[in-house]
Amino acid sequence: MIDKHLKIRSALEQKRIRDELQTAYDFDPRDPLFGLSKDALSGPRLSRRAVLRLLAASGTLSALHLLPQLGAIRPTAAAGGELSCGWSGVGEIRTLDPAQINQVLQFQIASNVLSGLTHINAQLIAEGDLAESWTVSDNGREWTFKLREGVVFHNGDAFTADDVLFTYNRSKNPEKSIHTGVLSNVTDLVKIDDYTVKFILTAPQASFLTKTLERASGRAMT
């Protein structure tokens, strides 16, 4: 394998390099990645052998071997308690207030804890989250959202149209939010009933669903 890739004609020089590589710190034949070629790691599919070696190198394979044993001692699922999660990132997490967050790490955490009226699915299309459906007027300036019923906050309080009004009015307030510019096209927000709200825009906005309602944007998170 080594001789195949070395472009050195001298057999003696090849042997010298081979001997050096055999004793090099990062050329250990026991390494699961030893001998994996670029072709073996190229897509669109990896061989079973390549996948197993990658799992072994990352330590995942060892963890997979432990899973059957862990199943026997797994505690019974129950409501409540605490879940500890870890995120890799740079910088201090100063706030998770959706009206103030402006770092990628903050968005990642907030979007896994909070919800918005819509979110972006795997096909990059906006779909309902806290809003179950919506309609838009013929002139494109009025968006009416029907909210999901039965949704509660983490403290158990019921989610209603009042919470949408509070969240968006706060996000439009420059003294409370750093995201006011994103909502500059929203001139008014009206509560129709406990589970229906209407956004009134200054002008039609094609990106309204994705730009102002998606939860990771720091807007209507609850």
Image (cartoon, rainbow, N blue to C red):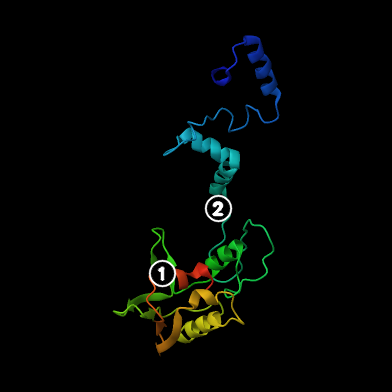
Residue 43 screen position, x and y as percent: 44, 38
Corner quadrant of residue 3? top right
Could you tell me which secondary element the residue under label 2 belongs to? helix
Which residue is located at x 48 percent, y 32 percent?
40
State the residue position of label 2. 72
Residue 76 visible here:
yes
Q: Which mark is residue 173?
A: none
Q: Nearer the viewer, residue 190 or 35?
A: 190
Dot 1 crowding, Cα within 10 Å, few <14, some 14–19, many 20+: few
Which residue is located at x 66 percent, y 13 percent?
13
Residue 75 screen position, x and y as percent: 57, 60
* Name of the residue lying farthest toward the top: 11
Q: Please say if 170 is above or below 39.
A: below
Task: Check disc 1 and give the amino acid type.
Answer: Ser
Corner quadrant of residue 199? bottom left
Query: CA gap, disc 2 to disc 1?
Result: 50 Å
Quadrant where the N terminus sits is top right
State the residue position of label 1. 207
Give the label, 2 or 1, closer to the camera. 1
Task: Check disc 2 and give the amino acid type.
Answer: Ala
First-in-chain label (2 vs 1)? 2
Residue 78 visible here:
no
Q: Nearer the viewer, residue 103 or 196?
A: 103
